[in-house]
Amino acid sequence: MFECDFSTTNGAGPGSIIVLGDSSFLPKGCVCASFSGCSKGLRAGMVLESGGAELLRVISGFWTSGVPGAKSWIAEVIGELPESAAQLTIKKEGYSLAYVTLSDKGAAGERKDEAGPLIAEMIKNALPVSIAEGYLIPDECADLKALLMHLAYVDGYDLILTTGGTGVGPRDVSPEATLGVIEKRLPGFERAITATGLEKTPHAMISRAVAGTLGESVVVNFPGSPKAVRESLEAVLPALKHTVDKLQGDKTDCAAVS
């Protein structure tokens, strides 16, 4: 639990975006609510409530220059905010999803991204999702490494799923970027994706998709075409929830799948 002062939010209503942090260190014009106390444990998608009323949904986090040890958060207003300070509690509901499409043409606006939104659609149909945010970036190894680290360690997304860049082309760098940051590899996911692809085409042999954990996030690479995304994601969907739960501390025994 921590205290948040809403007196400076200028009547921000549902759908508005505000910053939880120290307004004196933020750009002029930011709608900001200052907070005190321990906000440890906040992650993207979590809901902040007061007296049982849901007020805010966390979107992302960032470190603010000049504020010693202070992490700020971007949040969406989902309820009527108090006019003064209030005690907030943190509630987790559903799973947070970040999907990342790697495409030079897509990032340049020359190709519509269909694979990324398909990932979001399939995950929402299979799991309770608190928030889903999409990113479209060029095929740059350093860019993907930086984004994966931020999504996992700063924002705290449960699922980080990438599409594109898993082949052997000169610009296919998703596996290298992912291997450069993950902590525990998930070879079972990789085998399931390859095996499913081989049922459709021998070309699946060149897939280098990587899966693993990064902090408390599960990271999985998928191919770039919507058809291959659908087939590959269907192969690992049954294990995603269980993997996230175990990674984040679920101590119940692993039971047989009924």
Image (tube, rainbow, N blue to C red):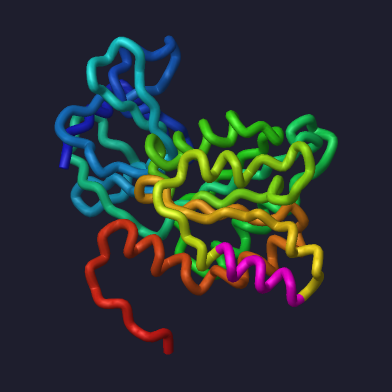
Above or below residue 44? Residue 220 is below
Q: Which residue appears farthest toward the bottom when viewing the image?
A: 258
Is 64 part of what is drawn in magenta?
Answer: no
Quarter of the image for the C terminus: give it: bottom left
Q: Is residue 256 left or right of residue 87?
A: right
Q: Is residue 33 left or right of residue 126?
A: left
Q: Position of residue 161 (x, y in %)?
A: 56, 52
Question: Which residue: 81% across, 36% down?
Answer: 105
Question: Which residue: 70% across, 55% down?
Answer: 223
Question: Which residue: 21% across, 46% down?
Answer: 89
Q: Position of residue 38 (x, y in %)?
A: 17, 35
Is 196 part of what is drawn in magenta?
Answer: yes
Quadrant position of residue 92: bottom left
Question: Which residue: 30% across, 24% down?
Answer: 21
Instruction: Residue 18: tell me if it is visible.
Output: yes
Above or below residue 222? Residue 87 is above
Instruction: Residue 14: tell me if it is visible.
Output: no
Above or below residue 187? Residue 115 is above
Of the pair 234 and 71, the residue shown nearer to us: 234
Q: Position of residue 124 (x, y in %)?
A: 55, 63
Q: Which residue appears farthest toward the right when viewing the image?
A: 110
Quarter of the image for the N terminus: give it: top left
Of the pair 41 and 144, the residue shown nearer to us: 144
What is the count of numbered marks? 0
Of the pair 5 and 197, the residue shown nearer to us: 197
Q: Is residue 145 left or right of residue 228?
A: left
- What secondary structure prevails in the magenta region? helix
Q: Position of residue 115 (x, y in %)?
A: 71, 53
Q: Which contiguous range is marked in magenta?
A: 190-199
